Image: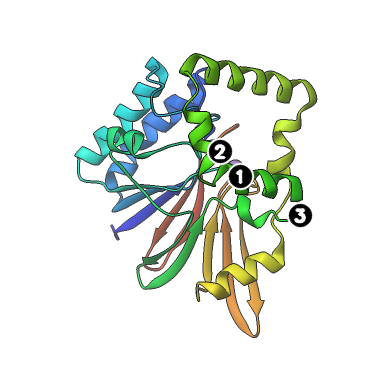
Amino acid sequence: MQPFTYFISDLHLAAERPDITQCLFNFLQTQAIQAEALYVLGDLFEAWIGDDDNSEFNNSIKSAFKNLAEQGIPIYFIHGNRDFLIRNKFAQQAGMTLLPEQCVVNLYGTPTLIMHGDELCTLDVAYQKFRRKARGWWWPRLVLSLPLSIRRKIAENGRKTSKKNHAGLTMEIMDVNSADVVEAMEAHQVTRLVHGHTHRPAIHDLTVNGQPMQRIVLGDWYDQGSILKVSQDKLELLTQQF
Ligand code: MN
């Protein structure tokens, strides 16, 4: 078997969806264990309110990843728009390495730009404004300085409101802006991009200035698990059934 690397994103893990969590555990124990590396491209959790939230649920996820890391599989994490408050404490406990929000990795000879992808949805001006604040220095500090019980309440209320008006999904439904895709790929001088966030799994072949380029979009884990498997001469967008 050729060496290969796995990518996953948008699992949106939550205690209310044990089927998704179980699917992840199966994936980690039986498939990821055979990979050279595992990249998690954001929105691993439906919500993350701070590394000090040591709920039984969070601990079970951390142990599952840690167990994989201890068996010698490097795990890398890029923040999503729902778990951007993940910090080094979580990463250490989960055996992960935190990467910057945009990162170029050499995948068997092909430099590949990886990111969560929410920064490409520039048509959503209000969200981009929030994103700048949320990824800045004072906002996360302020939020993380609140007592855990208050943060939990804020997250619960947010979930209730988003359930009521379905606003929670609006952002994910909005697609990437193609001009920004090209700009990001050119800025990083790559011909391949992998991202998640939009929940529209696909392999897009594009041509920019006569040059073939590829944009691979990971899907979410609401109905099934979306997994990207990359080896020297194969790139497969797979699904794992719950
Ligand atoms: Mn997202």
Which residue lies under the disc numbered 3?
Answer: 123
Q: For the N terminus, which image quadrant?
A: bottom left
Instruction: Please report contact status of discs 2 and 3: CB closer than 8 Å, yes or no.
Output: no
Amino acid marked by disc 3? Leu
Q: Residue at x 38, y 36 (%)?
A: 27
Which residue lies under the disc numbered 1?
Answer: 133
**Horizontal side, residue 168 vs residue 102: left or right:** right
Task: Give the Cα separation between the discs numbered 2 and 3.
Answer: 23 Å
Which residue lies under the disc numbered 2?
Answer: 139
Give residue 202's mark. none
Sequence-wise, the earlier of marks 3 and 1 is 3
Is residue 199 at all visible to an observer of this figure?
Answer: no
Q: Nearer the viewer, mark 2 or mark 3?
A: 2
187, above or below 13, in the image: below
Q: Residue at x 37, y 20 (%)?
A: 54
Task: Please state which of residues 46 and 30 is positioned toward the viewer in this rendering.
Answer: 46
Sequence-wise, the earlier of marks 2 and 3 is 3
Amino acid marked by disc 2? Trp
Q: Residues within 10 Å of mark 2 (few under 14, many from 20)?
A: some
**Percent position (x, y) of residue 123?**
76, 54
Is residue 152 at all visible to an observer of this figure?
Answer: yes
**Horizontal side, residue 52 vs residue 173: left or right:** left
Residue 208 appears in which quarter of the rendering? Answer: bottom right
Task: Give the Cα separation between the discs numbered 1 and 2.
Answer: 6 Å
Residue 87 appears in which quarter of the rendering? Answer: top left
Instruction: Please report contact status of discs 1 and 2: CB closer than 8 Å, yes or no.
Output: yes
User: Which colour style is shown?
Assistant: rainbow
